[in-house]
Image (cartoon, rainbow, N blue to C red):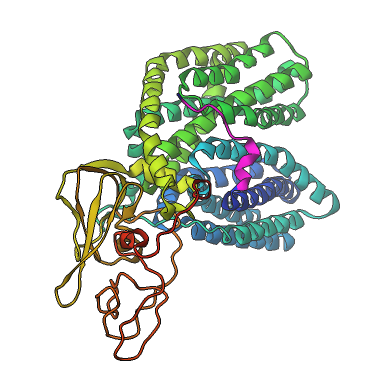
Amino acid sequence: MADTKAPGLLSTLRNRDFALFATAFTTSSIGAWAYNVALVVWLLDATGSPSWVAAATAGRFVPALLFSAYGGVIAERFERVRLMFVLDLIAGASMVLMAIEMYVDAAPILVVITAGVASVVGTAYQPAAAALTPQLVPEKELGAANALRNTIDNVCVIAGPGLGALLLLFGEPWIAILVNALTYLVSAGLTILIRVRSTPVDVTEGGEAGPWKQMQVGMRAIASSASAATLVAYSVVATIVFGMDTVLFVVVSRDILGTGAEGYGYLLAGLGVGGVAAAGLVTRLERLPKLGTIILIGMAAYCLPTLVFLVFDQPVVAFVAQVVRGAGTLVVDVLAITALQRTLPNELLGRVFGAFETLVLLAVLFGSVITPIGLAWFGLEAMIVFAGLGIPLLCLLGLPWLRRMDQQSVVRRAALAPKVSLLAGSDLFASVSEGAIDQLAGTAEFVDVEPDTVVVRQGEPADAFYVIESGDFAVSATDESGHEIELPAMGAGTHFGEIGLIENTPRTATVTALTAARVLKIDGRPSSRRSPRRRRRPHCWTARPCACGVPNREPHCPNQGSARTTRKDETTSCRSPRSTSAQDARRRTRPRSRPASKRR
């Protein structure tokens, strides 16, 4: 039975790293919206021409569209937290430069170019942030985390311009730009405090993949998952509708509501309020096992209220309709983003979200271009009917794909549950976030092992680690003189093979199945998670044998740890046993248990 109990929207902030991430994101987003207002005001004051405002919009939108796909590649190629830190610093520096340009009354073209540079910086930041989110929160809170990020976006849409207007009330536009630069510096300071680190990916595939092929990876990854592709398709459709809104709202405000240019911002604010109001609901909906119906309801809620413009001309009614629409689009967007994070490999997420950002920008462009053409050919009422009724009807064509997506979701959750339970119950992961455990579970596989099968052999390269679900295993190590040392056997719930991956060393022991067994195998170096905390292990100080029989100058001495030196005629007796690749036979000489309540 699926767990439909959803975490609260703010419960995600109990995760330290995500709280830092969300605070940084909020700070820089509010500053960015204030900067948008200041930029428009300065351009109008400096030139007196709305054409320069349009040029600034194009100067930011076009570079973002062109570089968004490669921004995802950059988000994959470098460690994401440090990348976001550097990008914040670059964005802050570009804002300082823009403030100086405004202060000295530089040519408007220079300000537009600087705005374009800042826009290009954002093309790598957004994919990095979206790809990092699953590492910061448990899997069960991922939907809530995305809903909170969207809520922050909607709040910033309202609060940011207000801050910009307030700053302009008491000062010049360049002051507002400097405040935005300060928000980026604060964001950088908060970001670098995040402890989780991602693992950079060789996006060049050994030097064989050029930039074009690197950018295609994200799109192919989306297409490879039917569930993710379906949800992304609906999100793109919703974004096309938003692109249509950017044009329709101007005409509706002027010709139907009679509110003039001010009514445009009034309607957009309604969308933002709806997104904020529905955030708590989304955290509950995304935990449901079947989301196909929810997607269709979300699209209907986003589109159908547009039809009120055919009947009512009161601004209050129009605002309420936009609140409902804002709730509907939030549902679709959050479900699409969460699906990408849950179903696709973490090492591809940066490029996936780079591709997703490209699709979103193209959708906005497409919607804003077809609407004037439709208004000229068919008129305002026809376009309202198409946006309000035609698009929801077209969405019904995707019903077979939505049903297939629901079936796959149920199967995936059932398959993932025992893996998560086994990993979470192991004290190796006591200091690892639930989000990282969930990601590992998604890449792990159960392997049945026959009796007398050697799972890992001493001296071989480490390529995986294992958690034992059932069965018993013998552990042995060979010293320098060739003597084989038998170590205590291992059973269900224990793990082995992690040291070679964490410390990048060959296997330090041989593990053989004594009985028929089943293990959970995690291939490769565990990526995109914080490694279990381990103290640095000093090598034993003498070349004399340790009590275990292995020369204690060797890194694989199974009792290395807090070692003491002895007289020359004594062996070294280690106070506390340490791990071999078999986790040193799991506390061989001093077993230690941990209450189940403390394991997570």
Residue 12 in magenta stretch: yes
Q: Which residues are magenta?
A: 2-14
Residue at (45% x, 13% y) in the render: 396
Residue 18, placed above or below residue 285: below
Query: Farthest residue toward the right?
Result: 170
Residue 4 visible from this viewpoint: yes
Quadrant housing residue 78 = bottom left
Looking at the picture, tell me which residue is in the foreground, 209 or 153.
153
Q: Quadrant of the N terminus?
A: top left
Residue 301 relative to residue 567: left or right: right
- Residue 427: x %, y % from top left: 43, 53
Residue 74 visible from this viewpoint: no
Residue 563 in magenta stretch: no
- Residue 389: x %, y % from top left: 55, 11
Query: Farthest residue toward the top?
Result: 311
Quadrant housing residue 262 = top right
- Residue 388: x %, y % from top left: 58, 14
Looking at the picture, tell me which residue is in the foreground, 118 or 378.
118
Residue 95 relative to residue 482: left or right: right
Looking at the picture, tell me which residue is in the foreground, 286 or 445.
445
Residue 76 relative to residue 485: left or right: right
- Residue 517: x %, y % from top left: 23, 43
Residue 569, placed above or below residue 348: below
The total number of labels drawn is 0
